[in-house]
Amino acid sequence: MVRLPRSPQRLAPGTRIAKSHRVANETFLMTATKDLRTIARARMHDARVLLQSKRFDGAFYLCGYSVELALKARICQTLKWSGFPETANEFRNLQSLKTHNLEVLLRLSGVEGGVKSKYLAEWSVVLDWNPEKRYQPIGQSTLQQAADMVTCAKRLLDIL
């Protein structure tokens, strides 16, 4: 979401606005769900490039981030929202959505049963991700782990 200042200001080129709403005399603009999906696909592409470049830790991390974004887009679709909240003020009363926990996001997405019944193997691989992986020492992810993560995350992105 983009918080608009009270004075007129131009938005950056390419910024899409899903829907604006006013709260306490402030206007909030939600980032479009379509943009979340686009970013998720772009991060998946980045992960494949990193895997091919033998940058296994980065590939592994970006796959998890990609699935997180896809789940947030799915939550928006399920709730018939045009965008996902971003700032602390916009998350007011929506704290359960302010998470990187993939299990929580899957539960809120409305597709948990289908994912766990048809894609349990893929989901189990992706669950090894958490945002703290970005701080782990280099060399913790193997070629096999990164390749499995790329394959499984891609399958999940295709159905989310």
Image (cartoon, rainbow, N blue to C red):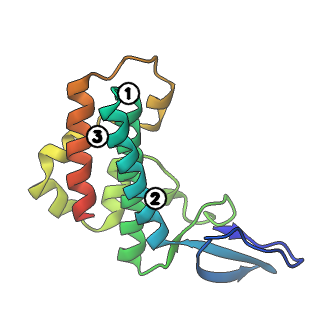
Question: First in sequence: mark 1 or mark 2?
Answer: 2
Mark 1 and mark 3: Cα distance apart in space: 20 Å
Mark 2 vs mark 3, foreground winner is 2
Q: Which mark is residue 55?
A: 1
Whole-percent x and y of residue 103?
Answer: 32, 49
CA gap, disc 1 to disc 2?
20 Å
Q: Are there few (<14), some (14-19), or many (20+) residues within 10 Å of tag 3?
A: some
For the residues labelled 1 and 3, say whether their Cβ atoms are less than 8 Å apart: no
Residue at position x 68%, y 68% in the image? 2
> Counting residues from the N terminus, which is met first, the one under dot 2 or under dot 3?
2
* Label 1 secondary element: loop
Residue nearest the viewer, comparing 123 with 17: 17
For the C terminus, the quadrant is bottom left
Mark 3: which secondary structure?
A: loop
* Residue 39: assigned label: 2
Q: Quadrant of residue 16?
A: bottom right
Please state which of residues 93 and 20 is positioned toward the viewer in this rendering: 20
| Depicted 9 relative to depicted 39: above or below | below
Name the residue tied to disc 3: 127
